Image (cartoon, helix red, strand yellow):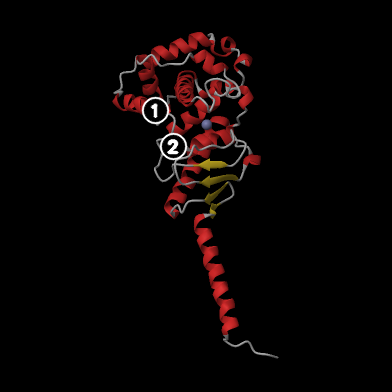
Amino acid sequence: MKRVTSNGFGCAIIRSLWLFLFLLASACATTGSAYRDGRFTIINHGNFSSAEVQRVSEQLEIGAKALEHYIGPLPAHKFPVVVNLRPGRGVSHSGQGQNGIELYWVREVRAPIIHELTHVLAGYNASNGHWTQEGFASYMQDQYGEDDAFPTQKMSHALVKVLGEEKSLLPMLEVMKDRNRTTYFGLGTPWERWLAYTQSTSFCRYLIERYGHEKFLKIYNTPFGAVDFDALYGKKAEVLINEWSNHVAGLSSDSTKARAVFHNMKTLLSRK
Ligand SMILES: [Zn+2]
């Protein structure tokens, strides 16, 4: 039997092995399952610290608990929810709740963690429209999330008040009728998209706070034409929209921050 001694060949193997282990370790540092429990799998694609990963996991738990209060028992088949943490300034998404969550803005504490979780757990069919799904997701984010996330950054009513003063409101009834992102919710019209998201969030907040979440969940993820507002709310959609507009216009909170966000968004998102 020939003994393998520390010759050049052996060293080459050992060097290769070390190099392999080093590359593997580097790869794991940027991409790898950073957190896993029975409900959530968080994958780190951007050297996020363990504190950042931990923060995301805690926000997911807070969001799940809050959602349970609104929608009842969470759908078991949706778990585990996979969350990909991405560096940079991308647009977070979850394929309308059908896929894993692609999450940006974590480092800046501006990630829509609970917004995307709401899409996954509450359900979302684009063919049913967008205003209740996007509105509810941002309501949940604003109400229960730590992050000041796009689109409303915890001030949907103040933003809508500014939109009214600036004569920038989209016709809400048309926003409610948009399905499959054919008009305002489309990616090709970023400014109108932001307006539609913002108005939807504020209107959903109004309906939930004024009439209760039980009624709201009866219209959630339902096409506009299939909702009988009269039977449910005792009022037509147009009347509810007017009520909401008057309520928001009458709020007396300081709108300095909302006005700054409005101008920033308009500059950033308006098509030249
Ligand atoms: Zn969304």
Disc 1/disc 2 C-alpha distance (Å):
21 Å
Above or below: residue 41 compared with residue 243? below
Q: Is residue 116 left or right of residue 256?
A: right
The residue carrying pointer 1 sits among few (fewer than 14), some (14 to 19) or many (20 or more) residues within 10 Å by Cα, namely some
Residue 39 at x, y percent in the picture: 58, 46
Nearer the N terminus, badge 1 or badge 2? Answer: 2
Element at label 1: helix
In front of the other: 132 or 178: 178
Look at the image and tell me in which quarter the C terminus lies. top left
Above or below: residue 183 compared with residue 80? above
User: What kind of residue is marked 2?
Assistant: Gly
Tag shown at residue 145: 2
Residue 40 at x, y percent in the picture: 56, 47
In front of the other: 30 or 125: 30
Residue 216 at x, y percent in the picture: 54, 21
Determine the residue positioned at 49% across, 8% down. 239
Extreme residue in the right direction: 1
